[in-house]
Amino acid sequence: MLPYWIAQFAGGLIAAAILYLIAAGKADFVVGSLASNGYGANSSGGYGMMSTLVTEIVMTGAFIFIILGATHGRALAGFSRIAIGLALTLIHLVSIPVTNTSADPA
């Protein structure tokens, strides 16, 4: 398990460094402003805390429901990837303007 944790941590650091290098190329870039989830001033659309909380709970719950349904033993084999991928796309299209989207069942 330790090598897995180390690999995840290293991958996260490398990805963050690459993302920083790309975003820093924008003239008015502010550290901490890129893809930050939040409410109020930190929300893409200026939504309040209750709106963003409900959005994250509903979208994550729907995503889990779709994952469980698509991977159930009675579901059609081979279609789970399509259902899960399209669901995640839809969730992001709906909730990015509200919270910048997390939808992370973990």
Image (cartoon, grey):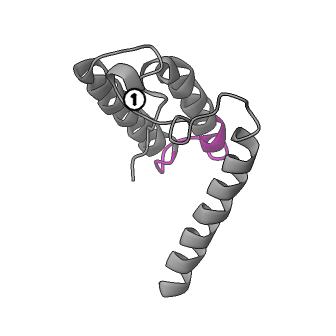
Q: What residue do we see at 22% from left, 21% from top?
A: 50
Q: Which residue is mark 1?
A: 59
Q: Is residue 24 magenta?
A: no
Residue drawn at (35%, 15%) of the image: 47
24 or 14, which lies in front?
Answer: 24
Asked where in the image residue 65 lies, by quadrant, the reply is: top left
Query: Which residue is nearer to you in this view: 75 or 36?
Result: 36
Q: Is residue 64 left or right of residue 86?
A: left
Residue shown at 47%/32% (left/top)? 101
| Residue in the picture at 34% in, 35% down | 61
Residue 102 percent across, percent down from the top left = 45, 38
Residue 25 is left or right of residue 67, and the answer is right
Q: Is residue 54 above or below residue 20?
A: above
Task: Identify the secondary structure beneath mark 1.
Answer: helix
Crowd tier of the residue under label 1, counting other residues whose Cα lies within 10 Å: few below 14, some 14–19, many 20 or above: many
Q: Relative to 8, is 77 above or below?
A: above
Asked whether residue 73 is drawn in magenta, I would say yes
Q: Which residues are magenta?
A: 71-82
Give the residue type at disc 1.
Met
Q: Position of residue 17 (x, y in %)?
A: 67, 57
